[in-house]
Amino acid sequence: MYAAVNGNQAMDLERDDLQGADDLAVKADERRMEMRRGKIIAVSLTVCAVGAGMTVNAYAASTTFEMRKKAVSLLGIITTSNYQANVTRGEFAELLVKASDYKEAANAAGTVSVFADVSSKSQYSAAIRTAATNSWMSGYLGGNFKPDEGVTMRDAIKAVLAVLGYTNEDFSGSLQESRLAKFKSLSLDSDIYRDLDEILTREDCINLFYNLMKAKTKEGNQYGSKVFDLTYNSDGEINTSSILDNSLKGPKILDNDSRNLKSLVPFSLKDATMFLNGEASDESEINDYATVIYYHEETKMIFAYSNGGENKGATEGRIKAIYYDSSDPFTPVKVVLNTDYQDNGGEGDEFQISGSELQYLFSVYGEFEVDDKIAIVWEKSGSDENATYTVVDVVGDY
């Protein structure tokens, strides 16, 4: 049974009767301060991680390809839906730079070309120059790089070992055999099954760069920890929550009038990796459909949510009613929104409220009340016929 509170009815409740409200108020005040500073609380971190197609617990388990793909994508190294496409030498140079201390230069405009067959206007010009200057990749006789040719396993072995700090002087005997032995000893070949002269696919590169994040450098440091401040689970796999740390910002409402994603993030959208309801997306689609966004500045990742999400999404509207459990009239358990396409006489959309912080925000002492315009980030459970939508984050439309 629920007790509905509409408009000023909520203010008639006796505030002195709410036992333990002080502790709850402190928590909510802290949350509001974090929201206003643009910081994310733990529940929001979970929303974004799950919205991107993963859960923290899932990453603590075995590293399936799906997990590796998401980890490498979150790091901003490679995102793709065409996993069997071959990777060119130019593209591979860019992946190396994105996975290195030089990642900020990955999308820099080229001004000088160091190879005859690489135009300074090429999208890979800056990355190729960086890869060549650091001896990760080499050119061919005649001053060519052959950027459009496929990158071979042989190329990749030399490149990632060089990224880890190894040079030719670190290998004795047959250079190729010594490199291959070191490559395998560092488990860089995990889930990659290619002969030396075979061309790598994007799936191979996802596995390769995930393995690189776990590998030890020549100095003995874990590479991903050094370059991306990654942490690792007890089984040695990447703790993906260390990618989505407290620098994740949001939620921010994408205003219905302006629909201007670029105004909500502090970086260029051409450098960004974007998701809508957990699927790869772009600026145009997010501007057209998204309700709220979160972003991670360091990796230039944007996580957007719309009302059309299958299992997770976001809905914007005005609060029509807040319902309280009849056995506890001071704890809200459900909120009803009237969206922009619903009139006030309609039933509205219902969302369950759980967790003390969110419940406080919708209580008579909290931040939101009837007729406020808000956006709710939700998770769906149950079948379509009996679906339940639960609030996991909320932001006011200020």
Image (spheres, helix red, strand yellow):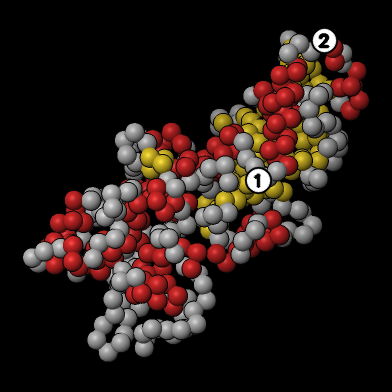
The Cα–Cα distance between marks 2 and 1, rounded to whole angstroms, is 34 Å
**Where does residue 225 sit, x and y in percent of width and height?**
39, 48
Q: Quadrant of the N terminus?
A: top right
Name the residue furthest left.
173
Residue 49, above or below 168: above
The number of callouts visible is 2
Quarter of the image where one finds residue 390: top right
Instruction: Say whether disc 2 or disc 1 marks the residue closer to the N-terminus.
Output: 2
- Seen at 36% across and 74% down, the residue is 133
Under tag 2, what secondary structure?
A: helix
Which sits in the foreground, 330 or 386?
330
Residue 392, percent from left and from top: 63, 34
Q: Is residue 150 above or below residue 13?
A: below
Q: Is residue 84 visible?
A: no
Look at 34% across and 41% down and name the residue there. Answer: 237
Relative to residue 398, is residue 270 depicted above or below? Answer: below
**Residue 19 in picture, x, y percent from top left:** 76, 11
**Residue 211 falls left or right of residue 12:** left
In-image side of 110 versus 147 (left or right): right
Please give the residue where the numbered disc 1 appears in the rendered image: 250
Would residue 386 be visible to someone looking at this image? Answer: yes
> Which quadrant of the view contains residue 10?
top right
Please tell me the numbered disc located at residue 17. 2
Name the amino acid type tagged 1. Gly
